[in-house]
Image (tube, helix red, strand yellow):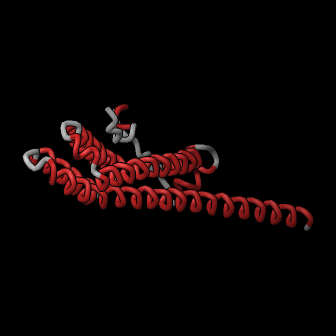
Amino acid sequence: MTAGYVILGLVAVVLLWGIGLYNSLIRTRQHVKESWSAIDTELKRRYDLIPNLVETVKGYASHESETLEAVIHARNAAAESSGTPQQQAQDENMLVGALRQLFAVVEAYPDLKANQNFMHLQQELTVTEDRIQAARRFYNGNVRTLNTRVEVFPSNILASMFGITQAEFFEVEDAAVREAPSVSFDT
């Protein structure tokens, strides 16, 4: 009779431990989803700033239409990207490259660099880039936690039983892209 209670107690402990471990995996997966949402919010903020920036530049440098169109095209591609973090990162890389070209063009227009609207937009873009970087770090930290829990024993057993898989990091490929676009126009 006592052996039966001991076995029943051990089964209960293992069951409760398994439930706790499963709930921990689910909470971590939800943190990853939530932190991706934060990145998405900041990227949308950037996408909303870019048309205003392009319109301001267009008033001063209308003959630079190829560069302006490249920025708009890259912005639209990045805004419409709804794939994996890796696909989003590739689209973001194209956008950051197009913004760099735009800022290189702006260097030739001192009146534009002194324009209050343009200076405000460049400040907003800098703040947004910082917020994107912070959101990316938060997301990647949550991904690291989930991926570790999915890989280590014994949580890897429960993760595979319930189809909980690793998440992708949101990484940029080029080290130069890891930096916010330069928006300083001091000469």
Residue appearing at x 36%, y 51% in the figure: 125
Residue 77 visible in the displayed image: no
Q: Relative to the observer, which residue lies in front, 175 or 99?
A: 99
Residue appearing at x 62%, y 60% in the figure: 22
Quarter location, residue 12: bottom right
Q: Relative to the observer, which residue lies in front, 50 or 73?
A: 50
Residue appearing at x 36%, y 60% in the figure: 45
Residue 163 percent location from the top left of the image? 48, 58
The residue most toward the right is: 2
Residue 107 visible in the displayed image: yes
The residue most toward the left is: 63
Quadrant placement of the N terminus: bottom right
**In-image side of 22 versus 131 (left or right):** right
Residue 64 percent location from the top left of the image? 11, 45
Residue appearing at x 7%, y 46% in the figure: 63
Residue 148 percent location from the top left of the image? 57, 44
Q: Relative to the observer, which residue lies in front, 149 or 186?
A: 186
**In-image side of 175 versus 164 (left or right):** left
**In-image side of 36 versus 30 (left or right):** left
Residue 43 percent location from the top left of the image? 36, 56
Quadrant placement of the C terminus: top left
**In-image side of 114 versus 62 (left or right):** right
